[in-house]
Amino acid sequence: MKKLLASLALAFIAAAIPANLAAAAPNVLLIVSDDQGWGDVSWRGSPARTPNLDQLRRDGTELLRFYASPVCSPTRASLLTGRSAVQLGIRDQFAPNDAGLSLLEHLMPETFRAAGYQTALTGKWHLGSTTAERRPLARGFDRFYGFLGPAIDFYTHVFTGPAGGLDWQRDGVTLNETGYSTDLIAAEEVRLLRTRDTTKPFLHIVTFNAPHTPYAAPDELKANYPALAGNAQTYAAMLESLDLGLGRILAELTAQGVANDTLVVFVSDNGGAGNSPARNTPLRLNKGNIYDGGIRVPAIIRWPGVTRAGATSEQFVTAQDIFPTLAAAVGVTPRNSLPFDGVNLWTTLRTGAPAVNRTFVMATDVNYAQFDGSMKLVRIGARDELYDIVADPSEATNLAATQPAVLARLQATLATTITRSLSTGRAGDARVTNLSARTAVGGVAGTPILGFVVTGGDKRVIVRGVGPGLTAFGVTGALADPVLELRQDSTLVQTNDNWLAADAAAMAASGAFALTAGSKDAALVTTLPANAYTAQTLSADPTSGVALVEIYDTGTGSTAARLVNASARAYVGTGAAVLIPGIAVGGGGASGLLIRAAGPALGKFGVTDAIADPVIALYRGNALIATNDDWGTATNAAHVTATAAAVGAFAFDAGSRDAALLMTLPAGVNYTVQVSGKNNTTGTALVEFYLVP
């Protein structure tokens, strides 16, 4: 009877363990450095001492063609999702107030935790932190220690951006610790290894912030480099500190007797920074660029007795390949519902089998690198270049003129990639949410008209005409008393002169800046059925001035209702009279948007004072991310024409000097579009935003 009970108990325990963990499962340790360049290792001539990386390389396989994104947030997103940053719509690093990686994306730690793994992230997150649901503990990690934003002071752990503030925590609790962050991160990982449940495997991800700015290092390590001075000396010491931290972690694996049971991967998140001591030689340029100096980075994989020791691999590998490859290596079934863009390269990396031909793309906001085997198409604005990246690692010889067939093939591949990112690549109901347009009102400027479309049912919105409220932002010449008119076609739906204090709470909940009590700004909070609308701002008296017209999606109403296409028609002048529409992209993932500035095209609609040559400039915060003067000169002009037809926009005439941009924009981010006249020309312009279906 006792044997029967024992057998039943063992059977019950076995059944409770996931099938892929019924036998001992290997551990996974992913270590990521921050802004470490291709040449920032001792075996490529760096003055920094990196003996532990050297040993990891001797014990494992060096990945000679590992590619990351040009900056860190896109790389981190690809590492954790197995998806291309281009498809995710993440082209730049997230700002502190950005929502970040879509909540609809499935992350690697979620798969591993479901398979019975203990999961932990130690170090830098930088994938969105505006709410608790966007932070590591809600994204598959059991434990988190480190910081949420882009960069911190290495000693005070205060965010180095303009907002400042302590950014250092353990499991959601802010810590005010002393110590050098590289040392603290390594020590925390050692502590987690020592306190883990040894009956379960672990997935630990360690994301050092070295050697990212601000440059700082312990004096005793700087003393090891007397021949160097200034940032060069500090940078070398930072790399050595990173290496020492790596060494302490690997030594702990050995001390616990689990080194042979742990798959270790080391990568950098992007190339070394420009105008710094970072070394990317012989690769071209640096971080933030789509030449190889910005995206080809050091990488090593080690699993004693499984991977090849002292070997190198010429296989092209990307950050998006890590999730599917690690899952296959340890026998875990990925639980993602959205498709991987990365591929499982485990067999090739483990055995040294012939390399798998890869086709993939890396990008910034406006530039692209399309790979196909050894050939690489580089698109810088409207200029296309072609390189054989194996034969010409420095990208010194442009083959575009001598290999037109290859160039055309890669151009077609890139066009397909961009089309997919604009349409099927986004996750969830990415949509245009908040809209605004700042322009002059009255006098020669006339009346600005902001148009928008509600689809799918009733939608509660906030419409504002702000004049006096702009003075808090340093705007001079603001309209003294705006009047707001909301129309459906020519029918007046609602109007407001002075906003109601009762609407203040709704405005605050939607993220609108507060209006001063008693100000003569105008606002409406209303529920609108599906239809097309215009919001017009006039002056209550004969005076003129600058006004801001805004539309906010409150997020309430029918669950299917969405605020989608938008337009702003206004007079474009110079100085304060430049037209500045703004948009926010909400929902999940990324949204494809067609943005147009029509001037000459308005003539066919009877507009007599249309601006002759409008110029679009798209900004994210203060950063210019795209611009266009004449739509027909862009490399994607044919795609712009096809997209305009697909979304129901009127056609631009061939050769017209209207402007257009076709972009993929990540959700949770605010953008502004500045429309001005080339050579200070003035006139009426129509700015349009179309959500690409």
Image: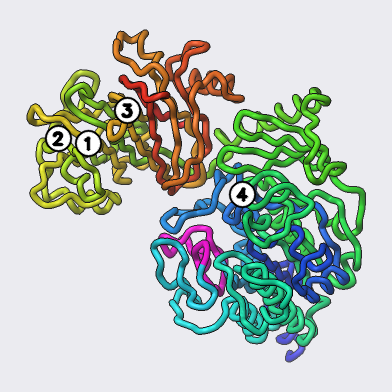
Residue with the mark numbered 3: 568
Stretch of the chain drawn in magenta:
125-151
Question: Residue at image x 9%, y 31%?
Answer: 540
Dot 1 and dot 2 residues touching (CB under 8 Å): yes
The three-letter code of the residue at mark 1 reads Ala
Q: Residues within 10 Å of mark 4 (few under 14, many from 20)?
A: many
Does label 4 or label 2 sit earlier along the sequence? 4
Q: From mark 4 to mark 3, how far is it between C-alphas?
A: 33 Å
- Which circle's residue, 4 or 3, is located before the other in the chain? 4
Q: Relative to 169, does residue 456 appear above or below in the rendering?
A: above
Image marks 1 and 3: residues in contact by CB distance under 8 Å: no
- Circle 3 residues within 10 Å: few <14, some 14–19, many ≥20: many
Observer-nearest of 44 and 22: 44
Which residue matches tag 1? 547
Magenta segment: does it hold 127? Answer: yes
Find residue 284 and report its horizontal and vertical position in percent: 73, 47
Residue 9: x and y in percent read 69, 82
CA distance separating discs 1 and 3? 13 Å
Camera-side mark, 1 or 3? 1
Task: Name the residue carrying label 2.
Answer: 482
